[in-house]
Image: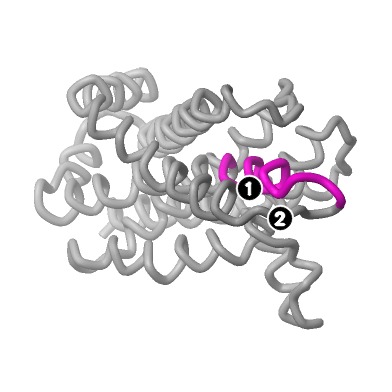
Amino acid sequence: MGIITVLWEKWIEFKRDFYKITLAAMITPVMYLVIFGIGVQTSSHGEPYLNYLIPGIVAISTMTGSFGAITQNMSVQRLYEKALDQVMISPTPLWQFILGQIIGGSLRGMYSAVIIMLLVTPIHTGLTFGPMAWFVMFLNGTVFATIGLTLSFLAKTYADAPKYNAYIIVPMSFLCNTFFSVEQMPNGFRQVVALLPLSQASGMIRALSHGEGIGISGIIILLVYIVVFSSMSVGFIYKKKNL
């Protein structure tokens, strides 16, 4: 019941800010498509660069949609509205509250992916996004929802949320197998970047959209991120409850 309550809150918030959320999900990807995809006439891996770029933008959108849906709102609710304190004294199981937040953030990321799909529909690239690709998108959104939730618990001021975006989301957006392959990076740095969740998600979504198979290792890496950051979120909230 607690999960449904949290998701209902997210749904009300989504309906209230529908146009703002939709516009925010469109602007940056459109800029990427215009500047890098259309403005830069080039090819990658023997095919039009757009075919390489679009899966990367899809991965970025699920990341930013999920992360943004959680980090700022939870920081405000925890630090200023004291909503987290009210949840902790309510009969709602805390794990259900956390799971509801993560699922809600993941669904916001999926909505961002849907927006991208609609935007690129007129572009005949031959890319196909089947059920497995959507599953990877959901996993990617879940990873960044859990990261966003953990960071929102660690935030000491409202200003910390934009800092997290600048320190984590922006660098990964440009480095993690989105606009260019990690194989082009220097040895050592390449291996580190390749292990980041967005690198794994971008690579798997790109392979699947081209009709290729993927290994289980990428899925396992994303699941490890989910387990680690979910555990950190649970640990934080239960520790705070027991103070």
- Please state which amino acid type lies under the numbered disc 2: Thr
Identify the residue position indicated by label 1 in the image.
Answer: 56
Magenta-colored stretch includes residue 121: no
Residue in view at x 82 percent, y 34 percent: 210
Separation of residues labelled 2 and 1 (CA atoms): 16 Å
Highlighted magenta segment, given as a residue range: 46-58
Q: 14 or 177, which lies in front?
A: 177
Q: Which mark is residue 42?
A: 2
Q: Is residue 103 above or below residue 66?
A: above
Q: Is residue 160 above or below residue 216?
A: below
**In what element is the residue under mark 1?**
helix
Look at discs 2 and 1 and give the one toward the viewer.
2
Pick the quarter of the image with the N terminus: top left
Q: Which mark is residue 123?
A: none
Relative side of 191 to 24, left or right: right
Q: 47 or 116, which lies in front?
A: 47
- Please state which amino acid type lies under the numbered disc 1: Gly
Residue in view at x 56 percent, y 63 percent: 174
